[in-house]
Amino acid sequence: MHAIEKIEVSLKTKVAYILGKNYKAYGYLNFSSWCNREEYCKYYLKEKIRLSSSHDIKDKKNLNANGFPTIWLTVDVLTFGDILVLLQLMSKNNLRKLASYYGYTAEELMSWL
């Protein structure tokens, strides 16, 4: 379980970094810029945010005018399984960037996860 937790934290950190750096704090809400399946991705993340019991997600000062948190806060409330789904939805370019942090191809990274 320790190993899986380290992998989860590393993946969350890298995904948030890639999306935050490339698209800024709320740029992830423009799903077509980073996601292969815009409508599903939009529904998936919005539903995860809505269902979260995190106090940080519920705190209005952490939300934009439309009621959404930053990418860093959003990724933080996702489970390991949620992150895996998110990776499957990411564009090939972003997935390649993520895999390169670990020295693998996107296909290798996804097969191991």
Image (cartoon, rainbow, N blue to C red):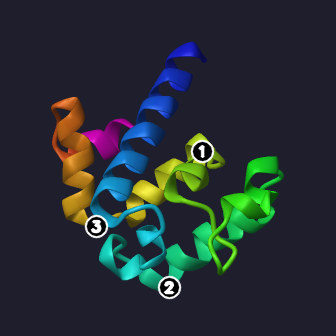
> In this image, 69 relative to 9: left or right?
right
The spot of residue 58 in percent (x, y) is: 80, 59
Vertical comparison of 89 with 83: above or below? below
Spatial separation of the CA atoms under disc 1 and disc 2:
22 Å
Label the magenta part by its dominant secondary structure.
Answer: helix
Residue for badge 3: 91
Q: Is residue 52 placed above or below 77 in the rendered structure? A: below
Residue 6 is left or right of residue 67, and the answer is: left
Q: Where in the figure is residue 103, as x and y percent of width and height?
A: 16, 31
x 47%, y 41%: residue: 12
In what element is the residue under mark 3?
Answer: loop
State which quarter of the image contains the N terminus.
top right
Circle 3/circle 2 CB separation < 8 Å: no
Residue 39's mark? 2
Amino acid identity at mark 1: Asp
- Residue under circle 1? 76
In the rendered structure, the answer to whether residue 10 lies left or right of residue 109 reads right
Seen in the picture, residue 96 relative to 1 is either above or below; the reply is: below
Q: Quadrant of residue 47?
A: bottom right
Mark pair 1, 3: CA separation? 20 Å
